[in-house]
Image (spheres, rainbow, N blue to C red):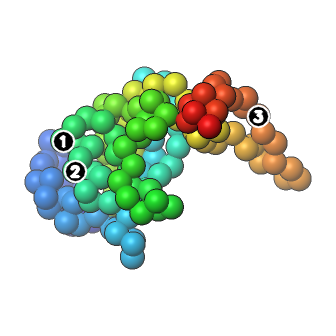
Amino acid sequence: MFKHNEQQPEGFQASLKEALDNLAFNDAGLVAAIAQQHDSGEVLMMAWMNREAIEETLATGRVCYFSRSRRKLWRKGESSGQVQMLKELRIDCDGDALLVKVDQTGPACHTGRRDCFYWKADASNVTIDKAPIKDPKELYGK
């Protein structure tokens, strides 16, 4: 669907069902989802969504992912309180990645950092360049 319709004019529409039916889910039934703060453009995290997570996110406005480690839906903030509210969901041109524009409450990363991309790489090293904004023990009560 995505390749076939890429030359359609602005304003062209397809049904959500058709779009979801044509997403390039991997063998585990997942698609990559990049979370971005809607007003600043800050990239917060990368996670995975299955069809059910996408449908729930669109229906409720609260972002839901699929946890590969727990093998179940993961409603962002369900244990930490650091929720993501959906502002916009976009599908890339190949239908194999999602951009989830969100309004993030507090840190997005389980480490207590604002985003998950705190390791900066150069030609010889990787360096942590962002401090936690909240103690993870406070987030998860551990």
Of the 4 image quadrants, the one containing the N terminus is: bottom left
Is residue 49 among the parts visible in the rendering? no
Task: Pick whichever of labels 3 and 2 is earlier in the sequence.
Answer: 2
Residue position for label 1: 59
- Disc 1 residue crowd, few under 14, some 14–19, many 20+, Cα 10 Å: few
Q: Which mark is residue 129?
A: 3
Residue appearing at x 69%, y 39% in the figure: 118
Between 31 and 2, the residue placed more toward the observer is: 31
Contact between labelled residues 2 and 1, with CB atoms less than 8 Å apart: yes
Q: CA distance from mark 1 to mark 3?
A: 36 Å
Tell me if 6 is positioned left or right of 142 in this view: left
- Disc 3 residue crowd, few under 14, some 14–19, many 20+, Cα 10 Å: few
Q: Secondary structure at mark 2?
A: helix
Query: What type is the residue that disc 3 sits on?
Result: Asp
Contact between labelled residues 3 and 1, with CB atoms less than 8 Å apart: no
| Relative to 51, residue 41 above or below | above
Task: Pick whichever of labels 1 and 3 is earlier in the sequence.
Answer: 1
